[in-house]
Image (cartoon, rainbow, N blue to C red):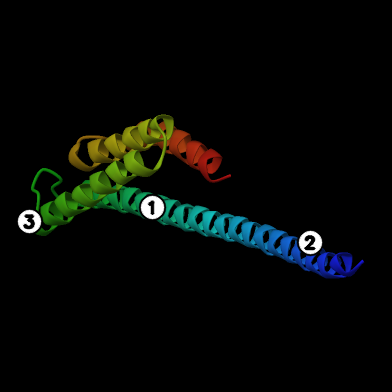
Amino acid sequence: MGSAQVWIPLLGVAVGGGLSYLAQFTAGRQAGRSEDKRQAAQLAEARRTERLELLREFIALAQEGIRIAEQRKRAPDPLATPAEWLEAARSLIDRLWVCERMIRVLFGDEFFQRAWDYASAVDHVIWEHQLSDEEMWDHLREHQRRFLNAARREVA
């Protein structure tokens, strides 16, 4: 009976140690999964913020392009292009196309196509000085509406 007295406590220690290891192992795995989920959520939120900022910038640049087109139309001689206007228009178009290319990187093809169509329409009204106000808005309206509707679907 002496050897049983030795083995029973050792067996208890082994079972207790095994259960303790199993509990720690399980807790460690769950903590790892929780950390992975937290990091994935953080990354998703950072990407969403980046995409929203890009959309905001694109919309602001498109609006600025429309204002530049209107300035030219309201000039005393729309055919005489002042150097300041030309520089502002070129700078804006460059920034608009860079933003449109970033949309290509961060969004899907269908949404990119809407952005490209809208940027092209803005580009057209900036450089086409012979459009009336009505023609200008007719050219912009549908592209703008399609882009904004697609943007709403993207961020929803």
Amino acid type at image mark 2: Val
Mark number, residue 15: 2
Q: Which residue is mark 3?
A: 83
Identify whether 58 is placed above or below 4.
Answer: above
Q: Do residues under tags 1 and 3 come within 8 Å of each other at their CB atoms?
A: no
Amino acid type at image mark 3: Ala
Left or right: 51 as drawn, with respect to 85: right
Q: Earlier in the sequence, mark 1 or mark 3?
A: 1
Identify whether 80 is placed above or below 135.
Answer: below
Say what secondary structure mark 1 lies in.
helix
Q: Which residue is mark 1?
A: 54
Marks 2 and 3, how far apart in space?
86 Å
Q: Position of residue 6 (x, y in %)?
A: 82, 69
Q: Quadrant of the N terminus?
A: bottom right
Marks 1 and 2, how far apart in space?
58 Å
Q: Residues within 10 Å of mark 1 (few under 14, many from 20)?
A: some
Q: Do residues under tags 2 and 3 come within 8 Å of each other at their CB atoms?
A: no
Left or right: 94 as drawn, with respect to 67: left
Residue 120's image quarter? top left
Marks 1 and 3, how far apart in space?
29 Å
- Say which of marks 1 and 3 sits in front: 1
Q: Earlier in the sequence, mark 1 or mark 2?
A: 2
